[in-house]
Amino acid sequence: ILNVEQSPQSLHVQEGDSTNFTCSFPSSNFYALHWYRWETAKSPEALFVMTLNGDEKKKGRISATLNTKEGYSYLYIKGSQPEDSATYLCAFVGGTSYGKLTFGQGTILTVHP
Amino acid sequence: NAGVTQTPKFRILKIGQSMTLQCTQDMNHNYMYWYRQDPGMGLKLIYYSVGAGITDKGEVPNGYNVSRSTTEDFPLRLELAAPSQTSVYFCASSYPTGRNQETQYFGPGTRLLVL
């Protein structure tokens, strides 16, 4: 069983704050690391797929970094807005897994106006 | 493009009843997946399929069955519902790139309550 851990479990920030959270995954047999954003009552939506050590991806105010040697990825949100409130999921792909994702438990972000 | 659709949105079952959760995608994706989401536990893979006629177990397959007779449809069957199957079920699909980096597209979910 693969162990994918996210921290913190939940986070409350004020509008305008910058924030970041962590995803830890196995450092061996790495293929890809996904980040998904999941708003309440909606479906998870893909943010990034990261594949190379040192990868940095950016979409608007959200960015992510990847360290495959030590098995972690950070997601950063700059200048958080209430609409950023969601659960952020990371998912690991390892080995010959036909794209199967092993998800972390998620970080619940609440941005207060 | 409707994407991934799931029916029903919500269902209450009695213990021992059976039901089928429907999932359809119109993106011509070969890969399809069923997940369940329990509070604080993230998404757990139940079954997946890499093409019509091919299915395989995921992390938590017990109590479920699947079939894949067409590319578009991937129904999930619960034969004897148990309270432990109370959960939110998500279907997802992806197009194989051959590099294990496929983005998955999720349906809206089915909320199931077993009493």
Image: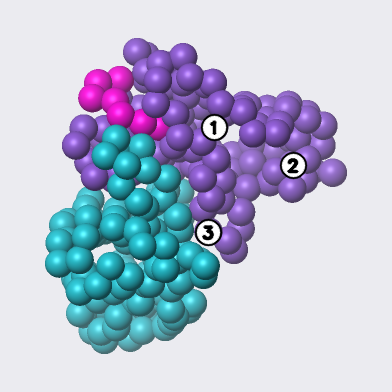
Residue A82 in view: yes
Residue A62: x and y in percent read 65, 32
The residue tagged 3 is: A43
Q: Quadrant of residue B77?
A: bottom left
Q: Mark 2 lies on which chain?
A: A
Q: Nearer the viewer, mark 1 or mark 3?
A: 3
In-front residue for pair B99/A17 = B99
- Quadrant housing the N terminus of chain A: top left
Q: Which of marks 2 and 1 is in front?
A: 2
- What's the residue type where badge 2 is placed? Val
In-front residue for pair A90/A51 = A51
| Mark 2 or mark 1: whose residue is earlier in sequence | 1
Q: In which quarter of the image is residue A24?
A: top left
Chain in purple, by letter, is A
The residue tagged 2 is: A111
In-front residue for pair A55/B17 = A55
Residue B15 in view: no
Q: Residue at x 37, y 53 (%)?
A: B94
* Measured Cα–Cα span from mark 2 to mark 1: 15 Å
Evaluate if marks 2 and 1 touch, with contact meaning CB atoms under 8 Å apart. no
The residue tagged 1 is: A8
- What's the residue type where badge 1 is placed? Pro
- In the image, which residues are magenta? A27-33
Q: Which residue is drawn at 15% across and 67% down?
A: B53
Q: Residue at x 70, y 38 (%)?
A: A12
Mark 3 element type: loop
- Quadrant housing the C terminus of chain A: top right
| Mark 3 or mark 2: whose residue is earlier in sequence | 3
| Residue B30 part of the magenta segment | no
**What is the drawing colour of chain B?**
cyan
